[in-house]
Image (cartoon, coloured by chain):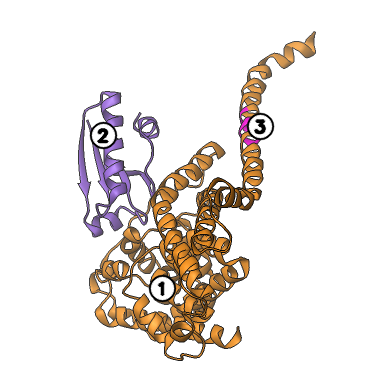
């Protein structure tokens, strides 16, 4: 079970990142939950200065750009 | 024989190294061919545009329509090709600069040097106004002085690659350099002034109470395949977003070129009208357009007698001071500080406008 969180104010990049993360998790067949976090304090506390950011189990694995589905798959394994 | 057996375990290693090298050579060759092709096509654009306008279409050089169409079919592909090349290059350069790294460089720097560095880093650090708030908090809570942070926040949107490409393509390198130079200067001086004014108490209280976490710098160990892909992504994202504005802006500009009489703008935006600079800034600040839409129009006005300083002031206030970004920053800044920020940057733009109207 992996907890995926997409951090960002909710702009287009955040939506795209959430879609890619979801597609990657589904392709790998892992159990997951996906949450979008737009609270600024939470974003800052995670150490993200350029949104969007992707957190897996509370740890930042990517920030500042929208990685491809393949890239997220590699990071999730 | 011994030598051969000794070399056996190394074969696998060299093979993969060789594969990687082949891949690099292939990518480099591909890139090189792309740049050469770009160069060849770029050099023929004017000839092609003239052929389309005067041979393929039954237009003549003397008509309004002819000069408008020529302007359009020459400038659109030219500016789009320049954008393609520069945005790709800048995308790769930006893969070496992350906000985290910029923050580390700026933290604890003395103010004057920090302002200069921040303005310069604002040009190369990836930035979008949607991340302005987390970036602001990340900077000021980790030892980057407030004024230095402002230098960054002013230069990042104002001196950007899209604006510079359009200025270079439509006005030439001299105006592009003047814009970049004065834009940086405004960012440095305005940030320094805000620092001197000790405005920290006008930052919302909760900002300094936030303890930002640290995340690993994801740009440190990228290989070239990833960097090149980031360049391509930048092209898709940025050119994909602005191409329509480029086309529309140049279409309006072409109309002005062809149909508005010479010196039409001289009385309104010319050097003689002292009030034209403040008026340009007053109209420009609440106006929101990206560089791609506004620069072609402004360029056409320049050809009709508008003064360069007034033009520069108008462009800078449209591109550099945007209403959406100020609204976003209201989350972390008190209204007094917002007013000071807008006031100082607008004054800087006014001075630039007057100076260039006097000099040129």
Q: Secondary structure at mark 2?
A: helix
Chain of the residue displaying label 2: A
Residue placed at 41% from the left, 80% from the top? B345
Tell me, what hue is chain B? orange
Q: Is residue B222 visible?
A: no
Q: Which residue is mark 3?
A: B25
Front residue of B136 and B284: B284
Q: Which mark is residue B150?
A: 1
Q: Chain of mark 3?
A: B
Please name the residue that numbered disc 2 is placed on.
A22
Marks counted in the figure total 3
- Residue B27 is inside the magenta segment: yes
Name the spot of residue B178 as percent of width and height, x first.
58, 73
Magenta region: which residues? B23-29
Estimate the spatial distance between the alpha carbons at disc 1 and disc 3, rounded to whole Å: 43 Å
Give the chain coloured purple.
A
Q: Is residue B31 left or right of residue B325?
A: right
Image mark for residue B298: none
Is residue B150 visible in this depiction of the protein?
yes
**Res. B344 image quadrant:** bottom left
């Amino acid at each position: 079970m992996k907890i995926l969180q997409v951090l960002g104010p909710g702009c287009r990049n955040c939506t795209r990142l959430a879609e890619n993360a979801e597609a990657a998790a589904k392709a790998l067949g892992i159990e997951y939950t996906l949450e979008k976090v737009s609270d600024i304090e939470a974003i800052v506390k995670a150490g993200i200065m350029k949104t969007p950011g992707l957190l897996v189990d509370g740890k930042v694995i990517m920030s500042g750009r929208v990685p491809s589905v393949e890239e997220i798959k590699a990071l999730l394994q | 024989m011994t030598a051969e057996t000794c070399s056996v375990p190394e074969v696998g290693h060299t093979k993969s190294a060789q594969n990687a090298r082949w891949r690099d050579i292939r990518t480099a060759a591909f890139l090189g061919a792309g740049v050469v092709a770009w160069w060849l096509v770029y050099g023929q654009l004017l000839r092609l545009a003239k052929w389309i306008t005067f041979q393929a279409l039954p237009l003549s050089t003397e008509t309004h329509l002819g000069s408008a169409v020529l302007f359009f079919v020459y400038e659109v592909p030219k500016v789009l090709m320049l954008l393609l090349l520069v945005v790709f290059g800048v995308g790769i350069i930006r893969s070496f600069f992350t906000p985290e790294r910029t923050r580390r460089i700026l933290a604890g720097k003395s103010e004057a040097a920090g302002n200069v560095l921040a303005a310069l880093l604002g040009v190369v650090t990836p930035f979008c106004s949607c991340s302005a708030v987390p970036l602001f908090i990340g900077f000021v809570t980790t030892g980057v002085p407030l004024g230095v942070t402002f230098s960054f926040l002013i230069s990042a949107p104002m001196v950007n690659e899209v604006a510079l490409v359009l200025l270079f393509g439509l006005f030439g390198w001299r105006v592009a350099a003047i814009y970049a130079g004065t834009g940086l200067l405004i960012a440095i001086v305005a940030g320094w002034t805000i620092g001197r004014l000790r405005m920290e108490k006008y930052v919302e209280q909760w900002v300094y109470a936030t303890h930002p976490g640290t995340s690993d710098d994801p740009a440190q160990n990228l290989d070239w395949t990833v960097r090149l892909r980031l360049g391509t992504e930048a092209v898709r994202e940025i050119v994909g977003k602005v191409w329509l504005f480029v086309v529309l802006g140049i279409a309006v500009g072409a109309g002005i070129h062809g149909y508005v009489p010479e010196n039409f703008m001289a009385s309104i935006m010319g050097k003689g009208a002292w009030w034209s600079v403040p008026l340009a800034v007053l109209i420009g600040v609440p106006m929101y357009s990206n560089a791609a839409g506004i620069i072609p129009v402004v360029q056409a006005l320049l050809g009709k007698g508008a003064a360069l300083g007034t033009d520069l002031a108008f462009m800078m206030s449209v591109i550099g001071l945007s209403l959406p970004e100020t609204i976003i920053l209201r989350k972390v800044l008190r209204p007094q500080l917002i007013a000071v920020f807008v006031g100082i940057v607008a004054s800087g733009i006014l001075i630039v406008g007057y100076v260039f109207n006097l000099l040129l």
